[in-house]
Image (cartoon, rainbow, N blue to C red):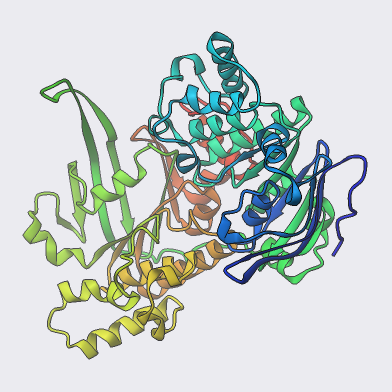
């Protein structure tokens, strides 16, 4: 492992032998690295590796429960760990700006865009009135915020994910910092918005001469945008060096594992003459827009607008598109969990006209795995109770022992030990929670599964594991999947066919290999460029 060379003339940030403990447990130990002026250094590793804790330590932003970090951190010549409060205020925002992982929780929900960015300015510069407003608009424009002047009065909940991230970037740049710390700046964003944000950061870095400390678990981002990389595992920096060298000849086994864990391969081919499990014809979902005192309907949003699709036994149909394109709404409509127009047939039978009572026996054969495995699992129920909940509804005749045996089998199928059934969701990692969610769906032996962004919140190594699991389960049980995702890399490894949605309509569909390799539509090409090349391409209808 190449160690940090210590502080030199061009060194902006120098971290030496950093250790951090929470409640007596060390989460970062002996980490050393440096960031030179104008360069990009990436901290990479799986969740829990200590990346964010290390980054927060650089500005002494850890909670009190984190105790006092040990070691030495020097930022622009200032000893951070021993700096008085006044010096810390100067460093935070003035010397180093920070873009946090989740802009929705980092922005104040009660403050407008203008106030959010303005506060970052006046902390370091005496400014008010028209000059302050002009500076806010200038910063928002610099961050690529569209029609900034018209959206100054908007609140965070009124903005898209990409717009919120741009507000965060604008606030971080308010005082022309020498260093920008970006903690997972593209997590939970569409691939197109991800590419736009990354290109924006690269552009700002060049224009302002900033250094960038980039925290991410996405090695593709590191490969394209970073100069040097620090690989972290269990709180230790296990390897670091120039990106080209580390990627070409990784020295540590963990680095080699990370580089090899991108979801790969293809699903097993669909059997000849495979039966059609689910079909939707001309599906429409509309949401009314109500205004005024009487809440009259003045318009409607066509969330899904005349979409048709079919899924066969053992087949995966991938639904891709930006947020708001109608993917999840269509999936819910196919399960009759969202009111819709059009024909829906399950195993050849029309289910669109069935009432709740008539649908109930069919529910066990049509299941869904939700995007957020933590939010979808009750924190008050054990894993065994969660997985077995559906059995109590659909198989009430089972004894307690019989139900426990079925639950144990379901847990084993998804790679979990039956004894884990006694634990609660918060005791599991993100990947394990997703396995629990899959087990809950499988325990009822369904024929059709809607998988709604099942890998979006997972590390790349865990993504690969979940993809392998889903493919194995499909081959074993001949399951039909409707796979919803904005991650085209995962879709490529999972889907037999791909349907591309935009504004509730199908813009392209076909065999997965064909759609990925040679997309016909400009919108699809832009999605592919963003996903595989991390390149933002202009295309009609792409959002900021």
In this picture, residue 344 sits left or right of residue 372:
left
Question: Foreground: 94 or 375?
Answer: 94
Q: Can residue 474 be spotted in the picture?
A: no
Q: Can residue 52 be spotted in the picture?
A: yes
Q: Position of residue 404 (x, y in %)?
A: 27, 86
Residue at the image position 54 percent from the left and 27 percent from the top: 119
In this picture, residue 29 sits left or right of residue 174:
right
Residue at the image position 83 percent from the left and 62 percent from the top: 249
In this picture, residue 352 sits left or right of residue 513:
left
- In the rendered image, the residue lying farthest to the bottom is 401
Q: Quadrant of residue 387?
A: bottom left
Q: Position of residue 507 (x, y in %)?
A: 41, 34
Q: Position of residue 26 (x, y in %)?
A: 65, 69
- In the rendered image, the residue lying farthest to the top is 130
| Quarter of the picture holding the N terminus | bottom right
Q: Is residue 372 above or below residue 506?
A: below
Residue at the image position 56 percent from the left and 14 percent from the top: 128
Question: Foreground: 417 or 311?
Answer: 417
């Amino acid at each position: 492992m190449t160690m940090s060379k210590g502080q030199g003339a061009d060194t902006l940030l120098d971290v030496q032998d950093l250790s951090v403990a929470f409640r007596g447990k060390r989460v970062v130990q002996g980490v050393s690295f440096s960031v030179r002026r104008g360069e990009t250094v990436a901290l990479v590793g799986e969740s829990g590796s200590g990346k964010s804790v290390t980054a927060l330590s650089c500005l002494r932003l850890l909670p009190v429960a984190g105790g006092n970090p040990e070691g030495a951190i020097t930022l622009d010549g200032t000893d951070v760990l021993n700096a008085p409060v006044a010096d810390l205020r100067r460093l935070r925002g003035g010397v180093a700006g920070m873009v946090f992982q989740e802009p929705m929780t980092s922005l104040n929900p009660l403050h407008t865009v203008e106030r959010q960015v303005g506060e970052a300015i006046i902390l370091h510069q005496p400014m008010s009135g028209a000059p302050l407003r002009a500076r806010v608009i200038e910063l928002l424009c610099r961050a690529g915020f569209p029609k900034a002047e018209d959206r100054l009065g908007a609140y965070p909940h009124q903005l898209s994910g990409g717009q919120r991230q741009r507000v965060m970037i604008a606030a971080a740049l308010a005082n022309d910092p020498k260093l920008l710390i970006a903690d997972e700046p593209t997590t939970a964003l569409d691939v197109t918005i991800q590419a736009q944000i990354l290109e924006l950061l690269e552009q700002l870095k060049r224009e302002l001469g900033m250094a960038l400390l980039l925290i991410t678990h996405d090695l593709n981002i590191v490969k394209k945008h970073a100069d040097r990389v620090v690989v972290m595992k269990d709180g230790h920096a296990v390897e670091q060096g120039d990106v080209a060298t580390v990627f070409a000849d990784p020295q540590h086994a963990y680095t080699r594992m990370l580089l090899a864990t991108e979801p790969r391969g293809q699903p097993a081919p669909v059997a000849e003459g495979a039966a059609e499990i689910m079909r939707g014809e001309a599906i429409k979902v509309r949401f009314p827009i109500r205004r005024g005192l009487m809440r009259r309907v003045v318009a409607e949003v066509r969330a899904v607008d005349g979409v048709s699709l079919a899924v066969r036994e053992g087949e995966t149909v991938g639904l891709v598109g930006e947020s708001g394109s109608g993917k999840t709404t269509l999936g819910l409509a196919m399960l009759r969990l969202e009111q819709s127009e059009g024909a829906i047939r399950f195993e050849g039978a029309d289910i669109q006209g069935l009432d709740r009572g008539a649908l109930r026996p069919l529910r066990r054969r049509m299941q869904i795995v939700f995007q957020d495995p933590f939010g979808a699992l009750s924190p008050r129920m054990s894993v065994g109770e969660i997985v077995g909940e559906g059995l109590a509804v659909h198989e009430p005749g089972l004894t307690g022992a019989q139900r426990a045996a079925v639950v144990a089998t379901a847990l084993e199928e998804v790679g979990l030990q039956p004894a884990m059934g006694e634990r609660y969701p918060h005791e599991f990692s993100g990947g394990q929670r997703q396995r629990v969610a899959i087990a809950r769906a499988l325990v009822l032996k369904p024929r059709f599964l809607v998988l709604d962004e099942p890998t979006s919140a997972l590390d790349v190594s865990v993504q690969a594991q979940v993809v392998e699991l889903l493919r194995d389960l499909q081959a074993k049980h001949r399951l039909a999947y409707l796979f919803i995702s904005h991650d085209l890399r995962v879709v490529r490894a999972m889907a037999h066919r791909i349907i591309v949605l935009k504004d509730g309509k199908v813009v392209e569909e076909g065999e997965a290999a064909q759609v990925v390799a040679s997309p016909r539509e400009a919108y699809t090409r832009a999605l592919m460029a963003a996903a595989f090349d991390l390149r933002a391409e202009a295309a009609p209808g792409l959002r900021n």
